[in-house]
Image (cartoon, rainbow, N blue to C red):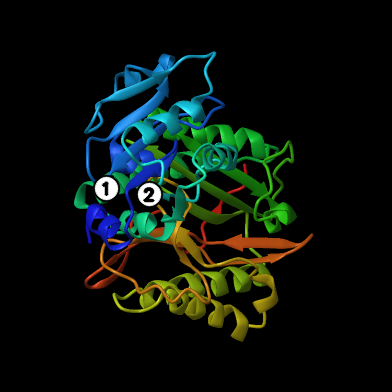
Amino acid sequence: MEVLEYMKLENLNALLLFPGANMAYYTGFSIGLSERLAAAVIPLIGDPYFVVNELEEELRGQEPWFNETVVWKEEENPVHVLGETLSDIGLDHGRFGIPEEAPWGWINSLEKHLPEAVLVDVSKYLGYVRMIKTEREIELIEQACKITDEAMEEGFDQLHTGITEKELQKHMVTGMQERGGGKTFAGVLFGERAALPHGGSSERKLQPGEFILVDMGCTVEGYWSDCTRTVMYGEASNRQKEIYDIVLAANRAALNTIIPGNTCESVDIAARRVIEEAGYGEYFIHRLGHGIGLEVHEHPYIVRNNKQELEQGMVFSDEPGIYIVDEIGVRVEDTVICTSEGGRCLTDFPRELQEYTEK
């Protein structure tokens, strides 16, 4: 269903979009959130327009599919300007679709300015449209994944006793940037710190016999990759190998469940079952995955109780993990796509446990 058809079905008079992925996707104008209001008004009937500060009158040189602007000056109240533009086109009593990222302060002020207006959350529908990637979107994500794979391989070649998490992080980020990655991130954790799923890289130094967990990704034309690998510096112990093999088996079980028509939760359950049956269920503490596109975390979410059916073109992460605090952490994450023939990994760095020689 096209967006305009959805607006008709829901009796919406206009969409109001604010800085973020939805504005970029649906208008072609990419701008970050700041204290200065920027909005896109897409009415069901009539011409769309942007409301922007005069600093953005030229829309940053970008070429969205429409370019009419209403400009507000620094001394003006931008929410009042937005409200007046809606009143001027007869929508002061309208029904407006807004996404979940709409800044509460602006929305609260707009409701006071237009007390007869009705604001409707359309996040689910806007997110659904973005879940199904076009061929071009998939190409860009694949390019980002290739950059990530190559930078990861080069970065791991720098391993030596005494390297810090922050030093390895810098290698990974630089590697992606040098290969054309736009925005980048890299989280690096050694040894027992790998049990901190969202831990920040530190001055912790690498020692032989430790796991190294690296979670990293970058953008190409705004589209993200996301990949995590856990590798060994030196020779792994039997316990380290056991836990790693369980996580890898969970990653593979999830991949084999990625079939159009299966639910998002069925993929999570497939991975979780492997870890639970091995006796480590309490240490898998997050959902299996999240959608990947213009945002590194977006719909669909691969989690229990999500009955959303998988469709061709959906791209998301497959990232089971085991985290035993103060001892060990392992995660194996791929960016995957649902195809007519099942799941396909877009990240290709080896998944089997890699053991790097001590230096």
What secondary structure is found at the residue carrying circle 1?
A: helix
Q: How crowded is mark 1: few (under 14 residues within 10 Å), some or many (20 or more)?
A: many
| Rendering coords of residue 42 (x, y %) | 30, 41
| Rendering coords of residue 309 (x, y %) | 35, 74
Vertical order, 180 against 145 (above or below): above
Q: Residue at x 54, y 81 (%)?
A: 274
| Rendering coords of residue 176 (x, y %) | 43, 35
Vertical order, 30 against 228 (above or below): above
N-term mark: 1 or 2: 1
Quadrant assignment for the N terminus: bottom left
Report the residue that reaches farthest toward the right.
Answer: 326
Q: Nearer the viewer, residue 236 or 42?
A: 42
Residue 244 visible: yes
Quadrant assignment for the C terminus: top right
Looking at the picture, which amino acid does disc 1 mark?
A: Glu
Q: Which residue is drawn at 30% across and 19% down?
A: 61
Looking at the picture, which amino acid does disc 2 mark?
A: Gly
Report the residue that reaches farthest toward the bottom.
Answer: 277
Q: How crowded is mark 2: few (under 14 residues within 10 Å), some or many (20 or more)?
A: many
Q: Nearer the viewer, residue 341 or 18?
A: 18
Q: Nearer the viewer, residue 161 or 216?
A: 216
Answer yes or no: do the residues labelled 1 and 2 have beta carbons within 8 Å? Answer: yes
Q: Name the residue under label 1.
A: 137
Q: Which residue is drawn at 40% across and 72% down?
A: 308
Q: Name the residue under label 2.
A: 293
Q: Residue 60 carries which label?
A: none
Q: Nearer the viewer, residue 35 or 169?
A: 35
Q: Residue at x 27, y 35 (%)?
A: 48
